[in-house]
Amino acid sequence: MLSESPCHYSSNRASWSCTEALLKFEREALRPKGVQLDVAAGIPYRAHWDERLTPPEEWARVREKVASARQGLGLLSGQLRAMSASDWAFVGTCCSDQIQAGLDAGSGGGVPADVLAARRRADAFTAEFFAAALTEG
């Protein structure tokens, strides 16, 4: 579990590619041990931004970052997927005992039901977006 996202020069840190860092880690640390990189992302960081839904002055400011984010998705093709229920269950094991107990009991660990539902919708959107973007690219 890493906190890197597949930003690929699309964050506010223009000289840094999280995607390249992930691929370097895969090449230097995982591959020699026979371990495959599996990137489960919670959101398609900036890659899903749509010019048609963005004011022109804002699009002019972000279009290069969006293009970079989309390029980063292509670099991770075959290794990138949306977070799943089992991924979130794993994340839950990293939480406090109180939250873990709530998650185990099916109560959402104190997370409101509407927030959990929104997270499921976001995961479905991300999965659909990745499937379409990686098919087109």
Image (cartoon, grey):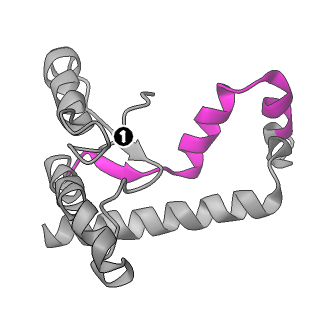
The kind of residue on which mark 1 rests is Ser
Residue drawn at (54%, 63%), measured in percent from left and top?
122
Residue drawn at (17%, 53%), measured in percent from left and top?
68
Label 1: state its secondary structure: loop
Above or below, comparing residue 127 to residue 11 in the picture: below
Reply yes or no: does residue 91 show up in magenta: yes
Reply yes or no: does residue 136 show up in magenta: no
Magenta part of the protein: which range? 78-102
Q: Which residue is mark 1?
A: 5
Above or below, comparing residue 84 to residue 1 in the picture: below
Rendered location of residue 17, percent (x, y): 21, 36
Rendered location of residue 31, percent (x, y): 17, 22
Magenta region, mostly helix, strand or loop? helix
Rendered location of residue 116, percent (x, y): 71, 57
Above or below, comparing residue 11 to residue 63 in the picture: above
- Quarter holding residue 89: top right
* Left or right, 124 with reference to 112: left
